[in-house]
Image (tube, rainbow, N blue to C red):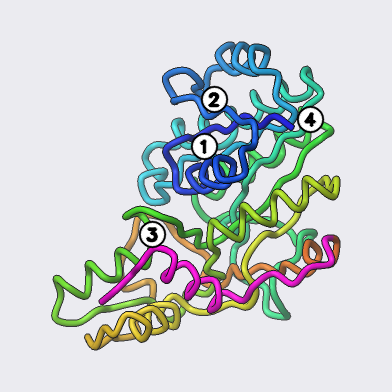
Amino acid sequence: MRYLITGKNGQLARAFIKKFEKQSIDFSAPDESRLDITNAAAVADAVAAYTPDVIVNCAAYNLVDRAEQEQGRAFAVNASGPKHLAQAAARQKAILVHFGSDYVFDGTKENGLYEEDDQVNPLNEYGKSKRSGEDLVREACGNFLIFRLSWVYGAGKQNFIHKLKEWARDSEYLKIACDEFSVPTCVDTVVDVTLRSLDQGLQGLYHLTNSGFCSRYEWARFIAGRLGIHKFIRPVSMDSFNLPAKRPKFSAMNNAKLSGALNVAIPAWEAAVEAFMREEHFAS
C-alpha cells in the first residue's frame, strides 16, 4: 500500500509519518508548496505522479475564530480541497481518508452522545466549512472514509496539554470553560484506528474519538493533576470568553459504530492522555 499524506506539518500528519517511518510503510508527504490542496491541478498532478492506494487528508484550516472573517480561506481548505482530493482519488481508484469535526453539530442533543446519522447544524463558519467538505467528498468519490474527530491533540506546542502548562506558568490562576463538553482525542488513537479500518476495508462515515467525554474544565483538572500543577482552576461559562465564533456546548460523539465494526475497544480519553504524556515526557 502506498500512502499520500497532505498537511505535512500538522500534528496529525506528523503522527502518521512517525508511524509509517517506524513500520517502513511506503508513503509520500509533500510540502504544501508542492501539494496545495486548494489547487485542483496541483492535486491532480501529485496524485497522478505518485499513484497512491490511499490518500490521507490531514490538511485543514482549524483557526475557528479567525474563520469568522476568513470564510473564503476556510472553505477553500476544508471544502474545495477535499473535493479536489476526492476527484483525484476517484480517477486513481484510490481510497480517500478525510477528517471531519464534531463542530458540524450544534450541541442541542439531550438524549446521548452524537451518532453518525444525527442531523448536522454547525454554528460557526469553521463548522460549516467542515460540513461542506464532508458533502463534497461524498459527491466526488465513492471510495472514502470520513472520520469525525474532536479536541485533537498531538506532539508539538499546539495541543491543549502544552497550552495549559504554559498558562499555569504565566498566570496566578486559570479560568477554564465548565460548560463545553466533547472528547479529547489523541492523534495516536486516530492513526491506529484509521490504519485498522483500512486493513479491514471499512468505508463510509464514522466518529473516531477516544471513549467517554468530559468538560474542558474536567480535562484541565485531569492534566493538572498528572503534571502536579497546583494553580487554582476556576470553572467559568464558555460565553465569558466572548470568542468570535459560537461553539457547541455539547458535541461529544459516540464511537460505538466504529469500535463495533472493528471489534476493538477504543481507549478511554483518560488512558490516552496519560499514555501521550508519558510518551512526550511531559513534566510539571
Residue at mark 2: 37
Residue 48 in the image: state x and y as whole percent: 68, 13
Residue at mark 3: 159
Disc 4 residue type (three-letter): Cys
| Magenta stretch contains residue 36 | no
Cα separation, mark 1 vs mark 3, equals 16 Å
Q: Which residues are magenta?
A: 262-284
On-image quarter of the C terminus: bottom left
Q: Secondary structure at mark 2?
A: loop
Label 2: few (<14), some (14–19) or many (≥20) C-alpha neighbours in 10 Å: many
Residue depicted at 46% across the width and 59% down the height:
153
Disc 1 residue type (three-letter): Ala
Which badge, 2 or 4, is on the more N-terminal residue? 2
Residue 50 in the image: state x and y as whole percent: 64, 17
Q: In this rendered view, identify the residue nearer to me: 249 or 47.
A: 47
Residue at mark 4: 141
